[in-house]
Amino acid sequence: MAKGVRIIITLECTECRNNPDKRSPGVSRYTTQKNRRNTTGRLELKKFCTHCNKHTVHKEIK
């Protein structure tokens, strides 16, 4: 089986992970795809976090 160029990654909210005093327990996570050849570094996107109730930076995790 050939290894594809596009891989599925998980994005996690950076504020939920670091802030213990937040609106509700839990961490916001999104799944998406990225092209391994074009984007070799870790991806960072601004997404809506339901736990923080605002738009925050979500970083790629393993």
Image (spheres, grey):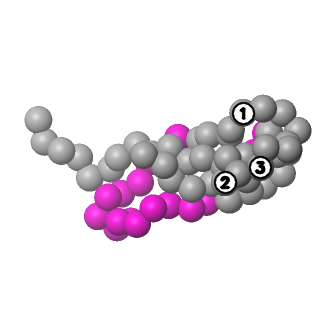
The residue tagged with tag 2: helix, strand or loop?
Answer: helix
Which mark sits nearer the N-terminus, 3 or 2?
2
Magenta residues? 31-50
Which mark sits nearer the N-terminus, 2 or 1?
2
Q: Amino acid at mark 1?
A: Gly
Q: What label sits on residue 57 in the rendered view?
A: none
The residue tagged with tag 1: helix, strand or loop?
Answer: loop
Q: Name the residue located 85 percent from the left edge and 42 percent from the top edge.
A: 22
Residue at numbered disc 3: 19
Coordinates of residue 49 in the picture (x, y in percent): 75, 45
Q: Nearer the viewer, residue 32 or 29?
A: 29
Residue 23: name its quadrant. Answer: top right
Q: Residues within 10 Å of mark 3 (few under 14, many from 20)?
A: few
Residue at numbered disc 1: 26
Q: Judge whether residue 16 is colored magenta.
A: no
Can residue 5 be seen?
yes
Q: Judge whether residue 42 is colored magenta.
A: yes
Q: Amino acid at mark 2?
A: Thr
Q: Residues within 10 Å of mark 2 (few under 14, many from 20)?
A: some
Coordinates of residue 47 in the picture (x, y in percent): 69, 52
Vertical comparison of 55 with 27: above or below: below
Q: Amino acid at mark 3?
A: Asn
Residue 8: name its quadrant. Answer: top left
Q: What label sits on residue 14 in the rendered view?
A: 2
Judged from this view, the residue extending furthest toward the top is: 25
Vertical comparison of 5 with 10: above or below: below
Q: On the picture, is 49 further left or further right than 36?
A: right
Q: Name the residue located 56 percent from the left edge and 62 percent from the top edge.
A: 44
